[in-house]
């Protein structure tokens, strides 16, 4: 009985100079600069939301509420008539309800504060007046 050995091709790997083609990694979209971002509190669940400046609506990722974004010059401030908590409200509102004590504070000349944009040293945009 004869035993013949069969030559085995040893797999030493690819030939010299050969490199495998790897698929390119997926490109991540560029992250916005922090100066392009703004923050607000969700009107329903009170979570802090971060969004791109200039957005008019922001949807909360927690409760899915769509929040209307007010610019700094569109917001007024008044202290609660009962507990003195600082309240923010959209300009044009005649009253605001405190989220802490639920007291309704009337907004008038006697308790109105300058717009937030004025307090921060930013000029409010000009109003369009027709004569």
Image: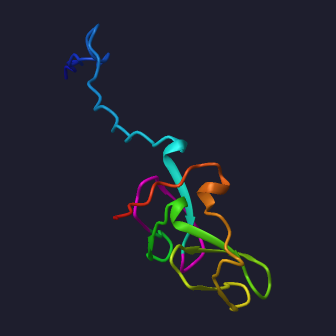
- Report the quarter where the N terminus lies: top left
Query: Is-magenta flag for residue 52?
Result: yes
Q: Position of residue 46 (x, y in %)?
A: 60, 75
Farthest right residue in view? 83
Relative to 14, residue 66 above or below: below
Q: How many marks?
A: 0
Query: Is-magenta flag for residue 59?
Result: no
Relative to 101, residue 93 above or below: above
- Report the quarter where the C terminus lies: bottom left
Farthest front residue in view? 131
Q: Position of residue 90 (x, y in %)?
A: 53, 74
Q: Nearer the viewer, residue 24 or 42?
A: 42
Would residue 74 be found to the left or right of residue 113 on screen?
A: left
| First to last magenta residue range | 43-58
Q: Position of residue 124 (x, y in %)?
A: 53, 55
Q: Residue at x 22, y 16 (%)?
A: 7
Relative to 2, residue 88 above or below: below
Res 89 → quadrant: bottom right
Q: Nearer the viewer, residue 84 or 128?
A: 128
Farthest bottom residue in view? 103
Res 113 → quadrant: bottom right
Q: Nearer the viewer, residue 113 or 49?
A: 113
Q: Position of residue 95 (x, y in %)?
A: 59, 86
Colour option used: rainbow
Q: Nearer the viewer, residue 60 or 110?
A: 110
Q: Residue at x 47, y 68 (%)?
A: 61
Would residue 82 be found to the left or right of residue 50 on screen?
A: right
Res 129 → quadrant: bottom left
Q: Residue at x 76, y 77 (%)?
A: 85
């Amino acid at each position: 009985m004869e035993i013949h050995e069969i030559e085995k091709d040893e797999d030493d790997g690819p030939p010299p100079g050969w490199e495998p083609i790897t698929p390119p990694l997926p490109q991540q979209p560029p992250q916005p600069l922090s100066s392009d971002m703004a923050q607000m509190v969700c009107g329903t669940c009170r979570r802090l939301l971060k969004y791109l400046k200039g957005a008019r609506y922001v949807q909360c990722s927690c409760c899915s509420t769509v929040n209307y974004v007010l610019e700094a010059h569109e917001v007024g401030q008044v202290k609660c008539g009962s507990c003195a908590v600082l309240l923010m409200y959209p300009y044009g509102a005649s009253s605001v309800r405190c989220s802490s004590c639920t007291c309704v504070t009337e907004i008038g000349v006697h308790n109105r504060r300058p717009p937030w944009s004025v307090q921060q040293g930013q000029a409010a945009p000009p109003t369009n007046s027709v004569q």
